[in-house]
C-alpha cells in the first residue's frame, strides 16, 4: 500500500499544480484557495484510496485534536445510521442494498469533521481528490467535459467553460487513478474493484486491518 499511496500522492500533486496554474491564469476570478471552507459542508463520497490517505494525515494530528475529530465523526456516522441501519463497518457505500446515499440533501451544511474551528482543513496535504477538483470545471485537453460544475464564487462575470487555459489532462489522470484504485482494492480486499466509496466522517473510523 505504501507504493500505491506514493503514486497516488504524485497524481494528486499534479492536480494541485494544475489548480495553481489556473489561479495564476485567472487571477481574482477564482476565489478558491487554501483557507476557504465554503464547500467543506455536507456529504460527498470519497474512494477507499482517499480514505487510506486521509488516515495517514489524521495520524499526524495531535492526540487531543484526533479525539475531537473522532467524536464529531462518530456523531456523524451515528446520524447516518439512523437513516441507513445497514451502514456499518467498513462503511463501504457500494455495499448498501439501495442507492439512497446517492441522493444527498443539498441543504445539508454539516461541517466536515476535519475542519478546524477556524475553518482550516486539518489534513490539507492528504485531502481527497474531490476536494482538490472542486471549484473549477473539469475539461480535458481534448475538450471532453468530465464536469461542468464550478463554485458560484468563481467566475462571476465570465464563463470558465470557454477558457482553454483551464483545461487539463483529466482523461489520463482519471485513468491512472482508476488503476491505483484497482490495485488498492486488490491489496486490501483481494479482488479488483473500482467502486469502493465512503464518506470522510466514516473514512476516519475504518479499520483497514478488518475490511471483511
Image (spheres, helix red, strand yellow):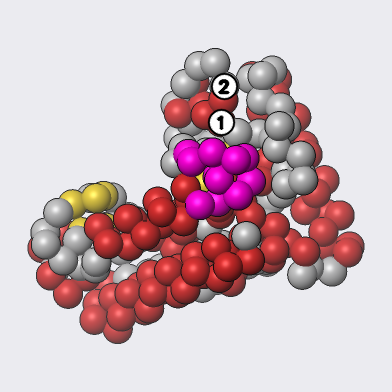
Q: Position of residue 3 (x, y in %)?
A: 58, 68
Q: Which one is nearer the viewer's eye here, 185 or 144?
A: 185
Check disc 2: other Cα within 10 Å, few if <14, some if 14-19, many if 20+: some
Q: Which one is nearer the viewer's eye here, 86 or 157?
A: 86
User: For the view shown, which residue lies furthest in the bottom direction?
Assistant: 24
Q: Which residues are magenta?
A: 183-193
Q: Position of residue 109 (x, y in %)?
A: 56, 42
Residue at (11% x, 59% y) in the render: 143
Q: Position of residue 123 (x, y in %)?
A: 65, 66
Q: Quadrant of the C terminus?
A: top right
Q: Quadrant of the N terminus?
A: bottom right
Establish if 115 lies above or below 89. below
Q: Position of residue 82 (x, y in %)?
A: 70, 20
Residue identifier under label 1: 93
- Find residue 96 and name its label: 2
Task: Say whether residue 165 is visible.
Answer: yes
Cβ–Cβ below 8 Å for labels 2 and 1? yes
Magenta region, main secondary structure: helix
Residue at (19% x, 61% y) in the render: 140
Amino acid at each position: 500500500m505504501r507504493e500505491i499511496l506514493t503514486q497516488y500522492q504524485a497524481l494528486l500533486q499534479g492536480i494541485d499544480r494544475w489548480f495553481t496554474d489556473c489561479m495564476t491564469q485567472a487571477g481574482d476570478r477564482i476565489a478558491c484557495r487554501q483557507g476557504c471552507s465554503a464547500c467543506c459542508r455536507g456529504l460527498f463520497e470519497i474512494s477507499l484510496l482517499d480514505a487510506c490517505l486521509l488516515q495517514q494525515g489524521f495520524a499526524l494530528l495531535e492526540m487531543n485534536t484526533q479525539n475531537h475529530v473522532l467524536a464529531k465523526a462518530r456523531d456523524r456516522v451515528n446520524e447516518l445510521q439512523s437513516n441507513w441501519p445497514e451502514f456499518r463497518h467498513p462503511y463501504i457505500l457500494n455495499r448498501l442494498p439501495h442507492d439512497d446515499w446517492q441522493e444527498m440533501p443539498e441543504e445539508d451544511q454539516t461541517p466536515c469533521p476535519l475542519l478546524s474551528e477556524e475553518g482550516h482543513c486539518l489534513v490539507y496535504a492528504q485531502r481527497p481528490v474531490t476536494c482538490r477538483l472542486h471549484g473549477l470545471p473539469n475539461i480535458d485537453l481534448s475538450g471532453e467535459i468530465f464536469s461542468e460544475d464550478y463554485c458560484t464564487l468563481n467566475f462571476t462575470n465570465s464563463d470558465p467553460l470557454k477558457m482553454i487555459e483551464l483545461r487539463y489532462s483529466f482523461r489520463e489522470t482519471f485513468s491512472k487513478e482508476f488503476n491505483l484504485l484497482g490495485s488498492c482494492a486488490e491489496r486490501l480486499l483481494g479482488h479488483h474493484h473500482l467502486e469502493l466509496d465512503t464518506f470522510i466522517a466514516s473514512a476516519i473510523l475504518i479499520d483497514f486491518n478488518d475490511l471483511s
